[in-house]
Image (cartoon, rainbow, N blue to C red):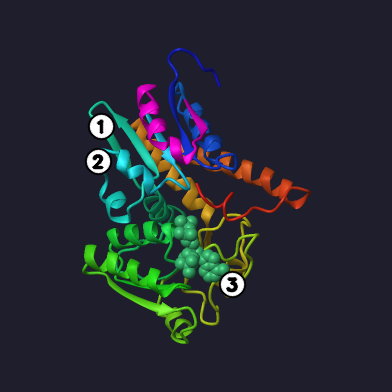
Amino acid sequence: MKIDGKTKLTGIIGYPIKHTLSPVFQNAAFKKAGLNWAYLPLLVKSEQLGFAIKGLKALNFVGINVTMPYKKEVIKYLDELSPAARIAGAVNTILFKEDGLVGYNTDGQGFVESLKKQAQFSPRGKNVLLIGAGGAAKSIAVSLAMAGIKRLIIVNRTPQRAQRLQRLIHDNFPRCLVKVLAVNDENIVSLQSENHLIVNATSVGMLSNPGLPIGMENIGRKHLVYDIIYEPAETRFLAGAKRRGARILNGAYMLLYQGVASWQIWTGQSAPVATMAAALEAEQNLKGAKNNGKSKPATRKNSNRF
Ligand code: ATR
């Protein structure tokens, strides 16, 4: 990559940032599209967040991604929010415009886009079982509701959090039916067969937190099962779903398509998705090879978040 006086800048802020996979596929996309742009990892300490946002604008950055732990906190520095970002209360993409800073949430959007592009699954009218009620689950729930799902069942270890998410969806999307079930509710298993899409949006299944988020007795051929974890590439949950005949997707697709949407917001062009996917895959294979050896397994803090 050639950096010169005309290079336009983008990047990602977070803390920590060294495990981010985004620079690899964002820069590959700029190169493929013949754009003199660059994407940088930017480590920002919490007390510096406001200065960092103002500084990046002053330095003429076109836009940035925002990752953990700033997706919520960054909102106070922005002038405008997309509907998904406003409802989810989280921003992962900023566009620095002349007349103000606009925040977007492409996490949920990327999730929905990956369903359509990778599994030819249209959410409209579908029933979804969502495990988890944290930040990622919230972005996913909002985008699925925006895409017109008929019913959402939320299962979460902490019921109060699931109930908060239920209220959020109910208040903003009154046509979407939303239910909450406790993790140990025996109906989870029987209800599985009524759902088209089953999503694990918890950290259960990561290398540092192996296990199954729910029992899998009724998962079968008619299901699409999505685990937003991408390390390991196939969690026990996904492996079990595959054995039972379900179609499966892992979190690498959500990561890819949130990046595709961000890229398009900044450049105004359609992104070279195949190039981005190939760059991400090559990087993951390298990481996988490393993790088979001496390096420490990924933890909740340093992986699975984009
Ligand atoms: P993120 O923003 O990445 O989604 P988060 O907001 O901390 O992270 O959410 C993590 C999700 O994983 C939550 O749904 C959490 O459940 P709680 O709300 O009960 O904390 C879930 N989770 C994490 N560890 C878990 C575990 N050991 N068992 C069950 N659920 C777990």
Q: Do the residues labelled 2 and 1 touch (CB within 8 Å)?
A: yes
| Relative depth, front residue between 293 and 113 | 293
Amino acid under disc 3: Leu
Q: Is residue 93 above or below residue 167?
A: above
The magenta-colored residue range is: 38-61
Can you give x and y, in whole percent of width and height, for residue 49 in the image? 42, 37
Few, some or many residues within 10 Å of mark 1 (<14, 14–19, 20+): few
Q: Front-most of 120 and 131?
A: 131
Q: What residue type is labelled 2?
A: Glu
Instruction: Tell me the residue at 50%/52% (across/down).
Output: 253
The correct choice, above or below, for 25 with respect to 133 in the image is above
* Residue 160 magenta: no
Circle 3 crowding by C-alpha within 10 Å: few under 14, some 14–19, many from 20: some
- Residue where numbered disc 1 is placed: 100
Residue 60 in magenta?
yes
| x and y percentages locating residue 202 in the rendered image | 50, 64
Work out whether mark 2 precedes mark 1 in sequence or the reverse, and give the earlier one.
2
Left or right placement of residue 192 versus residue 269 in this view: right
How far is mark 2 from mark 1, CA to CA? 7 Å
* Quarter of the rendering containing residue 24: top right
Task: Give x and y (percent) for residue 233.
Answer: 61, 56
**Residue depicted at x 47% and y 52%:** 254
Secondary structure category for the residue under label 3? loop
Asked which secondary structure carries label 1, the reply is strand
Q: Quadrant of residue 250?
A: bottom right
Q: Tag 1: residue type?
A: Gly
Q: Which of marks 1 and 3 is in front?
A: 1
Q: Where is residue 70 in the image (x, y as percent from the top left)?
A: 43, 45
Q: Report the residue at 55% width, 78% height from top.
A: 216
Q: Nearer the viewer, mark 3 or mark 2?
A: 2
Which disc, if any, is residue 80? Answer: 2
